[in-house]
Every structure is written in C-alpha cells, then in structure tokens.
Amino acid sequence: MPTSTSSPRATTPGTPGRPTVGRLVRSVPGTVEPGAVLTAAASRMARAGAGALVVDDGAAGRGPVAVVTDADVTRAVADGLDPAGTRIDQLGLARVEPLTAGTPVEEAARRMVAEQRQELPVRDGEQVVGVVELLAVCDALLGAGPAADEPDPGQGIRNMGG
C-alpha cells in the first residue's frame, strides 16, 4: 500500500516506514535579526498569524541562532520589559541546532522534550525551511489530528520567504 505524501506518516528515502519531520514543517514568516526589538517581532508574527520566528544573525554558514515565540514576547512583557526597547538578543534565548528534514519524528520528540522546546527549526540541506512544532510531532507519533485522517496540501516543506 503506498504511503501518502501529505500524511505526517510520510517518510524520507533512507528511512523506510519511519515518519520524518520533513512532512510536519510549518513555514514561518522569514527570519528576524537578534538585534530586532520585540515589537517588530510581535508585529511580524501577528501579521502572518504565526507563533514563532527563526532568529538568524545572517552570518554565512552559521544557520539559525534561536527561535523567538509569542510566549517569549509575552513573558518579557510580564517581566516588565519594554517591548519597544528590548531586543531579541536580550531575552537570553538558547542557541538552537536545527533538525534536518529527514530526522525521524521519534528523535525530534526526544530532543524537544530534553531541550524543553515547543518549536525547532528544520533545514533541508543548508536552507532553513521552517519550524516543526511539538504538537505536530505528537500528532504524528499518535496518528491523531486532522493530518492523520485526510491529506493536508498545506503541510510539507516550504520556503520561509522574507
């Protein structure tokens, strides 16, 4: 029986029968520099309906620096920081190593739990193509959620744009 290419159970060549994060990637509205202020990051996330941005300092070959989320912005405001004057690099976000599109979902889950992360960036080759969210990883492992029942043409690897 063929595997659906739109299902989170879809696999990458070389990992027969094992679901990979490449099918769970959600695009994010580009990247943001570490020196950007929180209001700029929050505005970009709100306009795009996204909950996270990949933080990238633009250094060739370095890849993403971190992932900043709407929860990070909320926490900063709750801590009394001025979002118009606080830069992303002042939040103390941990450096993040991206997953590859061929990373098995089980491995992604273990890493997300160990690092206490809700999102991790995903790269295909040298290009960051988006993020994978913990909820999508759990859905794939459990065979639950809308993507398990019917193909979602919006899922899969996409360029981030921006």
Image (cartoon, rainbow, N blue to C red):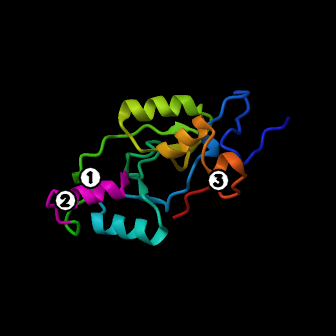
For the stretch drawn in magenta, the main secondary structure is: helix
Q: Which residue position is annotated with label 1?
A: 89
Q: Does the magenta stretch include residue 58?
A: no
Q: Is residue 91 visible?
A: yes
Measure how far apart labels 3 and 1 are at the Cα level. 30 Å
Please state the horizontal and vertical placement of residue 158, each as a whole percent of the image.
62, 55
Q: Residue 155 carries which label?
A: 3
Between the C-alphas of marks 3 and 2, the distance is 33 Å
Q: Of discs 1 and 2, which sits in the foreground?
A: 2
Kind of element beneath mark 3? loop
Other-residue count near label 2 (Cα within 10 Å), few / some / many at <14 / 14–19 / ≥20: few
Residue hosting label 2: 78
Give the crowd class for mark 3: few <14, some 14-19, many >=20 residues within 10 Å.
Answer: some
- The x, y position of residue 96, in whole percent, is 39, 40
> Mark 2 or mark 1, which is nearer the start of the sequence?
2
Residue 72 in the magenta stretch? The answer is: yes
Q: In this view, does 24 lie to the left or right of 88?
A: right
In this rendering, does residue 34 appear at all?
A: no
Q: Magenta segment range?
A: 68-82
Q: Which amino acid does label 3 sit on?
A: Gln
**Residue type at tag 2:** Ala
Is residue 82 shown above or below 61?
below
Front-most of residues 16 and 35: 16
